[in-house]
Image: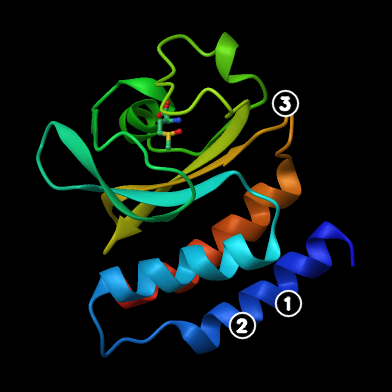
Amino acid sequence: MNKSAKYKAVNLQLSGLMDRDVHWIANAANFCSLFADHFDFFWIGFYYKIDPSYLELGPFQGPAACTKIHKGKGVCGHVWQEGKAQIVPNVHRFPGHIACNEESKSEIVLPVFSNKKFWGVLDVDSQYFSYFDNEDLVGLQKALATFEKILS
Ligand code: SME
């Protein structure tokens, strides 16, 4: 199965899995589990805005990670500041990248919104350089549109 077909299949499953009747933490946990099961990601997880100045680690799959990211810091903090997704082919070349784990070589970070207001980010890391492309962006954006429905 090629990557876009895989995103299509996983996104279909995700629509059935997201449940309005439970806390977002339960949904975010299942979101990460589903993607970790079907994709070869090193790390996938949420950082959510708990304070006007920083994001806190939410549900994730993968090794233990940094717990706080300040606005403007690292890729996640940059995405918060800019309000748009970012693909980083080589994390070593991203000024201020926060190295939670040195295995991580490339990443994609997307903003998450609740009622059109910034809520947090989805951070996906790979142990390979240049792992993420536009198909990942489109597939993950679709997944977040499903997740955002349970936030509003
Ligand atoms: N890569 C992030 C830090 C979080 S970890 O990768 C899980 C960043 O620079 O924002």
> Residue 146's x, y, as percent?
48, 73
Q: Which three-letter amino acid code belongs to the residue tagged 3?
A: Phe
> Residue 5's x, y, as percent?
82, 68
Q: Residue furthest front?
A: 63
Contact between marks 1 and 2 (CB within 8 A): the answer is yes
User: Which residue, given by chain and number where applicable, does mark 1 sit on?
Assistant: 9
Q: Nearer the viewer, residue 31 or 143?
A: 31
Query: Is any part of residue 147 visible from this angle?
Result: yes
Mark 2 C-beta to ligand 1 under 8 Å: no
Q: Nearer the viewer, mark 3 or mark 2?
A: 3
Image mark for residue 91: none
Q: Which three-letter amino acid code belongs to the residue tagged 2?
A: Gln
Query: Which of the marked residues, 3 or 2, is nearer the chain's N terminus?
Result: 2
Compared with residue 16, is residue 89 higher up or lower down, i.e. above or below?
above
Quarter occupied by the C terminus? bottom left
Compared with residue 123, is residue 100 higher up or lower down, i.e. above or below?
above
Name the residue: 9% across, 41% down: 51
Mark 3 neighbour density, 10 Å: few (under 14) some (14–19) many (20 or more): some
In this rendering, would 80 be left or right of 86?
left
Q: Residue furthest left?
A: 51
Q: Which three-letter amino acid code belongs to the residue tagged 1?
A: Ala
Q: CA distance from mark 1 to mark 2?
A: 6 Å
In this rendering, would 9 be left or right of 99?
right
Image mark for residue 129: 3
Q: Nearer the viewer, mark 3 or mark 1?
A: 3
User: Which residue, given by chain and number where applicable, does mark 2 sit on?
Assistant: 13
Name the residue: 36% across, 38% down: 65
